[in-house]
Amino acid sequence: MQSFEGKTAFITGAASGIGLALAERAAAERMNVVLADIEEEALARAVRKIEERQVRALGVPVNTMLEESVDAAAERAIAEFGRVHLVFNNAGVASTRSAGRALWEISDKDWDWVMGVNFYGVLYGIRAFVPHMLEHGESSHIVNTASLAGVLPGGGTYGVSKHAVLAMTEGLQRDFAARGANINASVLCPGFVNTNIHRAERNRPVLVAADSANPELEQQGTAFMSDLLSHGKQPSEIADIVFQSIRENRFYILPHPAWDEFVRSRVEQILARGPVASTDMMEMQRRREAGEVF
Ligand SMILES: NC(=O)c1ccc[n+]([C@@H]2O[C@H](COP(=O)([O-])OP(=O)(O)OC[C@H]3O[C@@H](n4cnc5c(N)ncnc54)[C@H](O)[C@@H]3O)[C@@H](O)[C@H]2O)c1
């Protein structure tokens, strides 16, 4: 997609963090903006913020874990604006409840929540919008938010869900090419960004409520993440890079080059048939304290 003005962007997780920054960037490009989120008060505030920019904005409550909810949000967007050209499947969560649990000890509720939002939410967004984009035929783009956790080893439920998003988006781009579709895809893989994701539990639906494995470890983990995130990039920087990447039709969007060496080492370990590469968080913390921004 080369031009954005007058077209329509649909963004999940738009009430906070990266999603809100994408909404603001879309508004700066004079697009119509559909903001979809589960947190209704924050969503209403976000919509007002976008409307101040004198563009058309629509707020749609959605729970991306549920296909019928994503379908209903897509229908509202299409009813309001006719054609949707740019979709950001961005809503995501990280569970802190599993702190201290090995993979086999993590509860089904935790898996269901994290895979439900991070993986199935993206799949439902693809299913809801691709047929519509194929039908209107105008140049369109889908950006799925994964993470560097989708490229690096480990990361528990979060890492698994983000690897799935990366793999699905690669498949999606191949399918677009095979069908000659006027649609492209990108996968966004950020490192630390200064958002509210360390407080993701605020939006955990009752249906997947889970007890904390170890409240003390959970608290420590949240504080550690909060510190790392607060020194991460600003969401607006990520949104600028994403829009530039769409213009340039880049598939892999990695806005944190400081992590490239970890990505390289993972690939090298695979090719060396070696042990699992490590991403040492304490090393990241030391380098962060030395002034590097991750
Ligand atoms: N912040 C980071 O360092 C970072 C790094 C890599 C990837 N990411 C990814 O970026 C994306 C955006 O996260 P963020 O960091 O801006 O966090 P955030 O918590 O600030 O924003 C996430 C938004 O998603 C919404 N959301 C949560 N569950 C939902 C659901 N079931 N249905 C609809 N909306 C829901 C939240 O209400 C919130 O507004 C996520 O996919 C996250 O995994 C973040």
Image: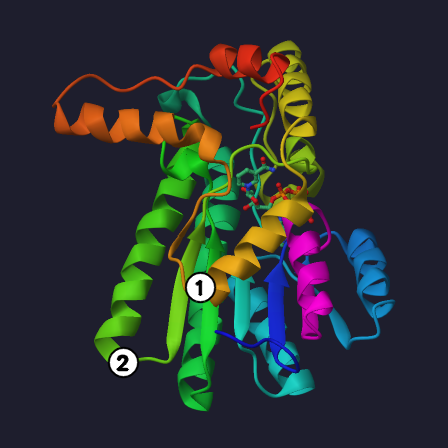
In the image, which disc is placed on residue 21?
A: none
**Number of numbered discs:** 2
**Which residue appears at 56% of the width and 66% of the height?**
70
Residue 221 occupies quadrant:
top right
Residue 173, placed above or below residue 3 = above
The amino acid at mark 2 is Gly
How crowded pointer 1 is (Cα within 10 Å; few <14, some 14-19, many 20+) is rated as: few
Percent x, y for residue 155?
A: 43, 27
Q: Which residue is mark 1?
A: 248
Q: Is residue 22 magenta?
A: yes
**Which residue appears at 42% of the width and 58% of the height?**
186
How crowded pointer 2 is (Cα within 10 Å; few <14, some 14-19, many 20+) is rated as: few
SS at circle 1: loop
Please report the bounds of the magenta region as a residue range. 14-35
Q: Is residue 71 magenta?
A: no
The amino acid at mark 1 is Glu
Q: Which residue is mark 2?
A: 180
Residue 284, placed above or below residue 9 = above
Q: Is residue 65 visible?
A: no
Determine whether, in the image, residue 79 is placed left or right of residue 85.
Answer: right
Q: Is residue 128 visible?
A: yes
Percent x, y for residue 95?
A: 56, 31
Residue 172, placed above or below residue 80 = above
